[in-house]
Image: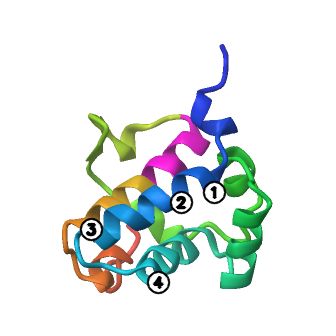
Amino acid sequence: MAKHRIYTTSFASVYPHYVAKAEKKGRAKTDVDRIIRWLTGYRQEELEAQLERQTDFETFFAEAPRLNPSRTLIKGVICGIRVEDIQEPTMQEIRYLDKLIDELAKGKAMEKILRKGEHNA
């Protein structure tokens, strides 16, 4: 089975859409970056380097320094699919990020987006 097109899409080509979606709802680029850093473990300089290198989504998540263990607390529907039910690991990471950006754009508090105060079961 062929890989989904998003895997070979440059993360840098989608990143401005994440930022625009957040800014349209009164949030900031710094909020988007904070979410990405929380999810992936990249430091800001590392995130910027990935954007500059035009890294594809598959590589972006494969090279993530430390995927946040609390990301499994992310639940809900994105693109008509429950993120917690996605079987393919890379697609699930991409959809986790999509869900977090959606929550940001919907005005959810950053502490809730970053799953502060929730515990893994």
* Contact check, label 3 and label 4, Cβ < 8 Å: no
The type of residue carrying mark 1 is: Ala
Give the quadrant of the C terminus.
bottom left
What residue sits right under mark 1 in the picture?
Answer: 12
SS category of the residue bearing label 2: helix
Label 3 to label 1: alpha-carbon separation: 19 Å
Q: Which mark is residue 121?
A: none
Within the image, what quadrant is residue 85 found in? Answer: top left
Label 3 to label 2: alpha-carbon separation: 14 Å
What residue sits right under mark 3 in the picture?
Answer: 24
Label 1 to label 2: alpha-carbon separation: 5 Å
Q: Earlier in the sequence, mark 4 or mark 2?
A: 2
The type of residue carrying mark 4 is: Thr
- The residue that appears at 57% across and 76% down in the rendered structure is 37
Q: Earlier in the sequence, mark 3 or mark 1?
A: 1
> Which span is picked out in magenta?
88-96
What residue sits right under mark 2 in the picture?
Answer: 15
